[in-house]
Image: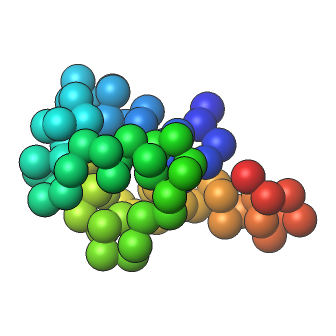
């Protein structure tokens, strides 16, 4: 299972057969930005997170929930 926000975005994108370019076009950003988010080099803005989630037909909570739970338990992912 993917542990970080970026890893969960990548997992959901690949599960839907989308390329970075296709998701970027759906979200209205560039593939480089999404790549940095997926690799954990950049955190998505809340607005980006919502747009990414909508494009992937999931909720923003689906993307961040496990990270939040880990932080609550004292583990940073």
**Which residue is at a point 11% across and 51% down the rendered structure image?**
26
Is residue 26 depicted above or below 7 in this figure? below
Q: Where is residue 31, by image quadrant?
A: top left
Q: Residue furthest right?
A: 74
Q: Can the viewer see residue 55?
A: no
Q: Nearer the viewer, residue 16 or 40?
A: 40
66 left or right of 15 in image: right
Q: Residue at x 14, y 37 (%)?
A: 22
Count of all numbered marks drawn on residues in the image: 0
The colour scheme used to paint the residues is rainbow
Residue 72: percent from left, percent from top: 80, 70
Who's the residue at 89% across and 65% down the image?
Answer: 74
Q: On screen, 60 above or below 40?
A: below
> Residue 6, position in %: x, y?
50, 47
The answer to whether residue 52 shows anywhere in this view is yes
The one of 50 and 19 positioned closer to us in this rendering: 19
**Furthest residue in direction bottom, as rendered:** 46
Residue 38 horizontal/vertical position (percent): 46, 43
Q: Is residue 49 left or right of residue 17?
A: right
Query: From what the image shows, is residue 55 above or below residue 19?
Result: below
User: Whole-percent x and y of residue 51?
Assistant: 24, 64
Q: Residue at x 28, y 56 (%)?
A: 52
19 left or right of 44 in image: left
Query: Quarter of the image containing the N terminus?
Result: top right
């Amino acid at each position: 299972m993917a542990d970080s926000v970026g890893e969960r975005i990548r997992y959901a994108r690949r599960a839907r057969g989308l390329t970075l370019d296709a998701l970027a076009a759906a979200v209205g950003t560039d593939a480089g930005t999404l790549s940095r988010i997926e690799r954990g080099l950049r955190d998505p803005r809340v607005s980006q997170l919502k747009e990414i989630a909508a494009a992937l037909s999931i909720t923003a909570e689906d993307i961040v929930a496990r990270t939040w739970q880990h932080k609550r338990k004292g583990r940073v992912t």
